[in-house]
Each structure stands twice: as structure tokens, then as C-alpha cells.
């Protein structure tokens, strides 16, 4: 997807049958209630922006459905207003299970991480560590494309009970072209 700008009045969006491999380029759509991305080539929920009013999502006939816990990943990537996934109502038990995972899991799913069968068997601190490891790998790959070396990674802020699900991670990178000199540090947060 090349680009979909912020369209503040858009309530329904159908992107089915477009051979999409990612949703990168899609901007936040504050009024979107229904999203159909079925029959594409989406293997993860990478690039799915925050859609605060989303109630229905349909991603049938995509490789993402090959993951055993794709529905849980969808609930992590989408807001609590979500009522139906692929035409099936969201059950309270599904929502409670997704919400029992660490807040980092939501951020990771939007970056391409998918929970597997082991994720559901692990305690939240172990899942949080899995997510932190994913974010490190994600940033290492991203740093390489910017010709940087990853120097340090920190999870700088985690939500407390009752706070919105936001997490701040900080990454210090060194530009490879200036390693011989005093290297400037670049800081990226998301």
C-alpha cells in the first residue's frame, strides 16, 4: 500500500482483492468503523494504524489466518471497540485473554509479531520478555537499513493498571559511517 492519508470522515473502507502485503502507509483513520482487507497477501498485522472507533474487521483469505492465534493478535492490534472479527462476534473471554497479555504485545503485533501456541501457555512476564526481544530484533533490522549499529535498547515506560496501552521504547544507534570519530547518538522512540 503506497499511502492512504488521514480521511477524518471515513467510516467504511474496503481494500479487498488488492494483493496487499502490508498496511504500511495507511494513516490513522479516526472515524473508521468497518475495515475489509480480505483476499490479500497479509501475513501479519504490520502497519495497521490506530483506529479508535473500529467495530468490524474482515481479513479472511489472507496468510495471517495460518497463525494459530491470529484472532488474538487481531484483538491486540485493534481497539476495545471491536465487536466482530471476520463476521464473528468478539466474545468476552477472547477479549479478556488478549488483555491479559502485556501491553508490549499490542505494540509488537502492529510491528509484525504474531503470538504462537507457546505464547498462551507462558506467564505475562515471559510474554513481555518475548515482546522486548522482538522489539530489539525489529530495531536491529531497522537500524541496519539506516546504516546504524544498535548500541542500547530500553523499555522506558510501561503502562500502569488502568492507563492506556502505550509503551515507550528507546533505542540508541550509532551511524556506521562515523564509528572512527566520536559517534553521535540517535534516539528513536515508539
Image: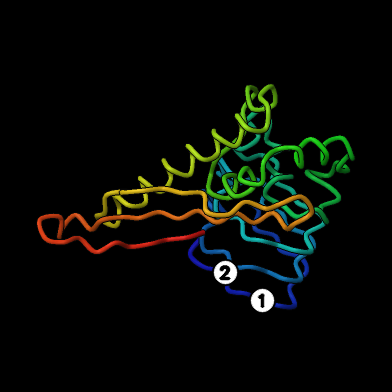
* Nearer-the-camera pick, 183 or 143: 183
Residue that badge 1 annotates: 7
At x 65% / y 23%, what residue is drawn?
117
Task: Name the image quarter holding residue 176.
Answer: bottom left
* Nearer-the-camera pick, 72 or 42: 72
152 left or right, relative to 1 = left
At x 31% / y 48%, what residue is drawn?
150
At x 59% / y 68%, what residue is drawn?
27
Percent coordinates x, y for residue 51 in the rendering: 71, 62
28 left or right, relative to 3 = right
Task: Name the image quarter holding residue 122.
Answer: top right
> Is residue 141 shown above or below 157?
above
Task: Name the image quarter holding residue 71.
Answer: top right
> Is residue 37 shown above or below 124?
below
Mark number displayed over residue 4: 2
* Nearer-the-camera pick, 133 or 79: 133
Percent coordinates x, y for residue 99 in the rendering: 76, 42
At x 88% / y 43%, what residue is drawn?
89
Callout 1 secondary element:
loop
110 left or right, relative to 151 = right
Percent coordinates x, y for residue 148 in the rendering: 26, 54
Percent coordinates x, y for residue 129 in the rendering: 55, 34
For label 1, the crowd category at 10 Å Cα-Cα, with few meaning under 14, some 14 to 19 and many 20 or more, is few
For label 2, the crowd category at 10 Å Cα-Cα, with few meaning under 14, some 14 to 19 and many 20 or more, is few
Mark 1 in CB contact with mark 2 (< 8 angstroms): yes
Amino acid at each position: 500500500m503506497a499511502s492512504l492519508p488521514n480521511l477524518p470522515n471515513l467510516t467504511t473502507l474496503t481494500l479487498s482483492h488488492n494483493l496487499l502485503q502490508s498496511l504500511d502507509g495507511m494513516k490513522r483513520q479516526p472515524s473508521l468503523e468497518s475495515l475489509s482487507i480480505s483476499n490479500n497477501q497479509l501475513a501479519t498485522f504490520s502497519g495497521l494504524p490506530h483506529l479508535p472507533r473500529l467495530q468490524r474487521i474482515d481479513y479472511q483469505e489472507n496468510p495471517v489466518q495460518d497463525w494459530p492465534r491470529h484472532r488474538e493478535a487481531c484483538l491486540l492490534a485493534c481497539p476495545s471497540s471491536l465487536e466482530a472479527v471476520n463476521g464473528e462476534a468478539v466474545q468476552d473471554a477472547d477479549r479478556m485473554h488478549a488483555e491479559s497479555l502485556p501491553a508490549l504485545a499490542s505494540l509488537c503485533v502492529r510491528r509484525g509479531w504474531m503470538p504462537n501456541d507457546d505464547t498462551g501457555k507462558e506467564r505475562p512476564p515471559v510474554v513481555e520478555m518475548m515482546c522486548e526481544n522482538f522489539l530489539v530484533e525489529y530495531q536491529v533490522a531497522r537500524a541496519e537499513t539506516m546504516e546504524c549499529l544498535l548500541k542500547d535498547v530500553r523499555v522506558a515506560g510501561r503502562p500502569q493498571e488502568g492507563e492506556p496501552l502505550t509503551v515507550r521504547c528507546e533505542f540508541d544507534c550509532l551511524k556506521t559511517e562515523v564509528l572512527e570519530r566520536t559517534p553521535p547518538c540517535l534516539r528513536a522512540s515508539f
